[in-house]
């Protein structure tokens, strides 16, 4: 498991695609990588999946349309992480193809590939420098952890189109809080 690799890969992708503002256009990134994003209601806690045929000429990210928009964005970013970082698990039906799933276990830090895909997604949606700048601008550099429901945190989460939970985790990982 290499969190730094995931962080660096997200940063390289944003630089390659010349993306310098938030919210990060994850659907456009997928399209740029020739990945189709499809929305469907999934049963249970399945957030998304990444399908790719053997030669990767067909790649699809399936997203649970029942989830909130912010969660859908995180799912797309997570599946992009799998696409760029991991080979996937082969399944045979009538021909071989590979799948990665994102479900309730993805965030439990059990599977190293899931941890990396989550780290990639967070780094892609909340690039470190953009996030530090937003915190400095909105909070004048002072973070009041006792008042984590403050309007400023809500505004930052909305600016990046992520959940407050994802925002707080990312702020912790990059050492801001």
Image: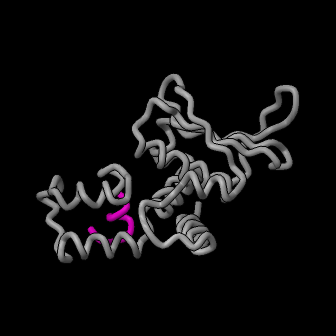
- Is residue 168 visible in the rendered structure shown here? no
- Of residues 118 and 154, which is closer to you in this image? 154
Which is the main secondary structure of the residues drawn in magenta?
helix
Q: Which residues are magenta?
A: 168-177
Give the quarter of the image for residue 28: bottom right
- Of residues 152 and 84, which is closer to you in this image? 152
- The structure residue drawn at horizontal position 80% and vertical position 38%, both measured from the top left corner, is 97
Q: Position of residue 38 (x, y in %)?
A: 61, 37
Residue 83 is one of the magenta-drawn residues: no
Image side of residue 43 versus residue 139, left or right: right
Colour mode of the rendering: one colour
Q: State the quadrant of the N terminus.
A: bottom right
- Of residues 152 and 93, which is closer to you in this image? 152
Give the quarter of the image for residue 2: bottom right
* Extreme residue in the top direction: 43
Q: State the quadrant of the C terminus.
A: bottom left
Q: Position of residue 16 (x, y in %)?
A: 63, 73
- The structure residue drawn at horizontal position 38% and vertical position 65%, both measured from the top left corner, is 173
Q: Position of residue 155 (x, y in %)?
A: 25, 58
- The structure residue drawn at horizontal position 31% and vertical position 56%, both measured from the top left corner, is 157
Image side of residue 79 versus residue 176, left or right: right
Q: Position of residue 12 (x, y in %)?
A: 60, 73
Q: Is residue 73 above or below residue 63?
A: below
- The structure residue drawn at horizontal position 80% and vertical position 49%, both measured from the top left corner, is 56
- Is residue 130 visible in the rendered structure shown here? yes
Q: Is residue 144 above or below residue 89?
A: below
């Amino acid at each position: 498991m290499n969190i730094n690799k995931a962080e660096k890969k997200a940063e390289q992708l944003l630089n390659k695609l010349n993306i310098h503002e938030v919210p990060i256009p994850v659907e456009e990134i997928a399209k740029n990588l020739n990945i189709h994003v499809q929305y469907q209601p999934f049963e249970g806690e399945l957030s998304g999946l990444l399908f790719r045929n053997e030669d990767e000429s067909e790649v699809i990210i399936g997203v649970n349309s029942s989830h909130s928009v912010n969660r859908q964005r995180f799912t797309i970013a997570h599946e992009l992480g799998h696409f760029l970082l991991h080979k996937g698990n082969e399944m045979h039906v009538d021909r071989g193809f590979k799948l990665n799933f994102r479900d309730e276990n993805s965030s439990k830090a059990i599977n190293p590939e899931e941890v990396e895909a989550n780290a990639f997604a967070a780094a892609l949606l909340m690039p470190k420098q953009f996030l530090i700048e937003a915190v400095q601008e909105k909070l004048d550099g002072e973070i009041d952890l006792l008042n984590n429901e403050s309007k400023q945190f809500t505004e930052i989460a909305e600016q990046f189109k992520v959940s407050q939970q994802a925002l707080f985790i990312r702020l912790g990982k990059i050492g801001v809080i």
